[in-house]
Image: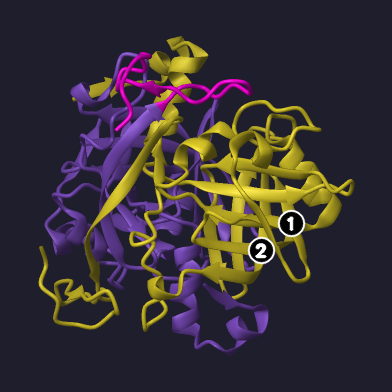
Chain colours: A yellow, B purple
């Protein structure tokens, strides 16, 4: 085992340290956030910091820097109060990564990467047509994080678009069947292989595997 | 494609809705948070909301409810200002899930699940011996989320313990080689399969695959 102490961290170069620290939280979700400016210029950017905040109300959050390559996303959300989140899958993970390049404000990441913008009734922010699970959100709150000057952007989910077959009978969405990818560190992309669903844990019982539909009686692999 | 609108969400039962909404953010990290109370009772609880906040300073955050099964974790962190985060791997994912059972305050999840507490010099909070990537944190801030009454707990990383072979020459940690697992929805566990690392994206160039050590010239699968 390697023991890395606070002093060792202080001696690392910023890039080396960024790679180490970005590996620590575990696998991260890979999502494209779609926005549009008041001037009708679409923006698309990959984020690895999208996370579940609560289901009632249905809230999702993500972390952004106030001034960074992602600033078009933030500016557009502040202007229009709306954004879309689009799960990245195996069919376009390289195009998704490419959206992290520093395109200028007038350049559109959809055009640059070949991904297809898609809009639906009443939602101005663009979805990614190639994504098989995506949703629109209304901005609820931007929480400043004092510790490092980042911002937590919180949205409430208004419209979900998802491949029908992936939605199981108890509400679980089989995102593995959608070939949804994840990120480790800053730049590594992965697909998934299911171990099992498990039932709700109780103190005096061992966990029991569930079928994809949430039924008891499956066999653990 | 299935289109789910705001009105449809309102009609769902709370459990069905929780399963749907918990699937939307994508794959989630699987981590055990270790704490100790002032009375020296260890606590261990699984969290799927641990996320990277920044590398300089090295900050990680997680979301908790003020009153819930996780409250021992929160109370202990408030008392001692310290906690550990331990990546869950394929060797103990079922034991990790079992920590989510509602054990009473006096019961120790280590004893109940058979996982092994491990302490190091100057860190009172217990690590999970079976985890191959784990770190200690000092509490920096607890940010209340107005939208749903949850709390964002932010810690600064002080000590990292990691399998040596997993740390690559550029600082990237190959968490796939540690068999780190991830969660989808509320209860599904998965392992990973790497597509590739990719180089830093530039506007006029296609992404190029990197070797595990971060070198150019690998071939994309």
The chain holding disc 1 is A
Q: Is mark 2 on a helix, strand or loop?
A: strand
The relative height of residue B168 versus residue A31 in the rendered view (above or below) is: above
Label 2: chain? A
Q: Where does the C terminus of chain B fall, quadrant-wise?
A: top left
Numbered range of the magenta stretch: B198-221
Residue B199 among those drawn in magenta: yes
Q: Are marks 2 and 1 in contact (CB under 8 Å)?
A: yes
Q: Which of A10 and A92 is in front in this view?
A: A92
* Residue at left offset 51%, top offset 15%: A14
Please say whether residue B94 is one of the residues in the magenta stretch. no
Would you name the residue on which mark 2 appears? A136
In this rendering, would A149 be left or right of B139?
Answer: right
Q: Name the residue under label 1.
A: A125
Quarter of the rendering containing residue A213: bottom left
Left or right: B159 as drawn, with respect to B156: left
């Amino acid at each position: 085992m390697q023991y890395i102490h606070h002093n060792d961290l202080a001696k690392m170069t910023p890039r080396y340290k960024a790679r180490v620290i970005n590996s620590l939280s575990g696998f991260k979700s890979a999502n494209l956030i779609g926005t549009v400016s008041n001037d009708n210029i679409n923006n698309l950017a990959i984020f690895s910091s999208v996370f579940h905040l609560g289901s009632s109300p249905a809230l999702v959050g993500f972390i952004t820097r106030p001034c960074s390559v992602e600033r078009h996303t933030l500016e557009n959300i502040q202007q229009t109060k709306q954004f879309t989140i689009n799960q990245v899958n195996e069919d376009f993970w390289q195009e998704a990564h490419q959206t992290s390049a520093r395109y200028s404000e007038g350049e559109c990441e959809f055009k640059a990467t070949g991904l297809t913008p898609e809009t639906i009734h009443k939602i101005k922010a663009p979805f990614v047509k190639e994504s098989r699970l995506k949703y629109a959100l209304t901005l609820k709150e931007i929480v400043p994080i004092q510790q490092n000057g980042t911002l937590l952007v919180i949205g409430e989910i208004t419209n979900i678009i998802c491949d029908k077959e992936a939605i199981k009978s108890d509400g679980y969405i089989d995102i593995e069947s959608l070939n949804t990818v994840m990120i480790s560190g800053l730049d590594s992309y992965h697909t998934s292989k299911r171990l099992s669903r498990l039932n709700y844990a109780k103190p005096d019982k061992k966990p029991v595997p569930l079928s994809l539909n949430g039924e008891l009686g499956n066999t653990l692999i």
